[in-house]
Amino acid sequence: MHFLNRLWAGALVVLLGSSYSNASPGPIQLLGRDHSQTRVIAGVTIPDTPVVRAAQAYARAHADDMTYNHVMRSWLFGAIIISRSKDSVAIDPEVHAVAALLHDLGWDNTGELVSPDKRFEVDGALAAWNFIESSVHNGTIHSHDWDDDRKWLVWDAIALHTTPTIFAYKQPLVFLTAAGINADFHGPESDLSGLITWNDYYQVKAAFPRLDLASGVSKIICGFARNKPATTYDNFMMQFGIRYVANYSQNSVGHLGIDEVENALPN
Ligand SMILES: *[C@@H]1O[C@H](CO)[C@@H](O)[C@H](O)[C@H]1NC(C)=O
Ligand SMILES: *[C@@H]1O[C@H](CO)[C@@H](O)[C@H](O)[C@H]1NC(C)=O
C-alpha cells in the first residue's frame, strides 16, 4: 500500500523543513484554549478535553477494529510529530486530535455515515463537521470554542488526507494530520516529518495492532470502486478499480478527466 510514492515522500520531507522558513525559529506554538489537560496513551501525551474524548468514542463506534487502530496510531504519530517539531508553526492539538480520530468516518462500518455519491474523504469531512455541531448542541463543547475556522480546518484535513500534491501546500495542521496518517503506513520510512523513530512505531503498534492494515484498506477501497465508482475516477482509488474490480476500466470510459478535456467544445 503506497499512498505516496517514495519520491514524493522525499520531496515532502524537504518541504516540511522549508515551507515555514519565513517564520521565526522556535518550537511549535500550541493554539487553542487549554493545554494543561493531557493524558498518555501508548507513551504519547495527548490533549484530554471533552471533545477529544467524544471524538475517540465516536471513532470507536463507527469503525471496525482495523480502522479504529489505524486512526488511533495516526493520531498518536501526529502528536509525536507535534511534540518534536522544531518548525515554528501554530498547531492546535485539539483540532488535530479531532481530525485524526475522525479521518476515516467515510469508512463507517455501520454504514450510517457513508453516502452513495460522495468520495469517502468528503463523507468523513462532513461527518466530522456534523459531529462537532452535535457536540455543541448537546453541550459537550461551547459554540464559541468551535468557530467555522476550526471546523474548516478539520474538514480540510480529512478531505485532503489522501492527496499529498495538495495537502503539502495547505495549512500546517492539514499537512501534519496527513503526516501522522502517512507515518502509519510505513513507519519512519514514510514519515513526512522525519521525526518518528522505529521505537515510536513499535510502541504505538503494540498498543494498537495493525490487524492486516494493507489488505483491510485495499478491501474497503475496492468496495468503493465497485459500489460508487464515480467517486474514484479522479483520485488514487482508481488504481484499485483498475487492478481489482471487474469491468471497472471499461465502465469508466467517458467519465474521466481525459474525456472532459478531449471532448471539449471546438472553437
Ligand atoms: C454529544 O454528542 C457527541 C457527538 O455526536 C457524542 O459523541 C456524545 O456522546 C454526546 N454526548 C451526550 C451526553 O449525549
Ligand atoms: C463484465 O462485462 C461483461 C461483458 O459486458 C459482462 O458479461 C459481465 O457480467 C460483467 N461483469 C461484471 C462483474 O459486471
Image (tube, grey):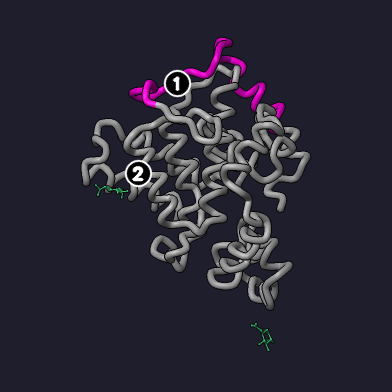
Q: Secondary structure at mark 1?
A: strand
Q: Of the residues shown, which amino acid type is indicated by label 2?
A: Ala
Judge depth for marks 2 and 1 and give the one in front: 2
- Residue at 55% x, 35% y is 42
Q: Position of residue 74 (x, y in %)?
A: 56, 41
2 or 1: tag closer to the N-terminus: 1
Taking the spot 40% from the left edge, 39% from the top edge, the residue there is 152
Please, what is the three-letter code of the amino acid marked with disc 1?
Answer: Leu
Q: Residue at x 52, y 19 (%)?
A: 28
Q: Residues within 10 Å of mark 1 (few under 14, many from 20)?
A: some
Please give the residue where the numbered disc 1 appears in the rendered image.
30
Q: Is residue 14 magenta?
A: yes
| Mark 2 element type | helix
State the residue lying farthest toward the right.
7
Towards the viewer: 192 or 186: 186
Which of the two residues, 232 or 216, is positioned nearer the viewer here? Answer: 216
* Residue 12 figure quarter: top right
In the rendered image, the vertical position of residue 128 relative to residue 107, given as above or below: above
The spot of residue 3 in percent (x, y) is 68, 49
Residue 199 among magenta residues: no
Q: Residue at image x 46%, y 66%? A: 117
Residue 35 falls in which quadrant of the image? top left
The residue carrying pointer 2 sits among few (fewer than 14), some (14 to 19) or many (20 or more) residues within 10 Å by Cα, namely some
The quarter of the displayed image where residue 177 is located:
top right
Q: CA distance from mark 2 to mark 1?
A: 21 Å
Magenta stretch?
12-37
Residue at the spot of label 2 = 54
Q: Is mark 2 within 8 Å of ligand 1?
A: yes
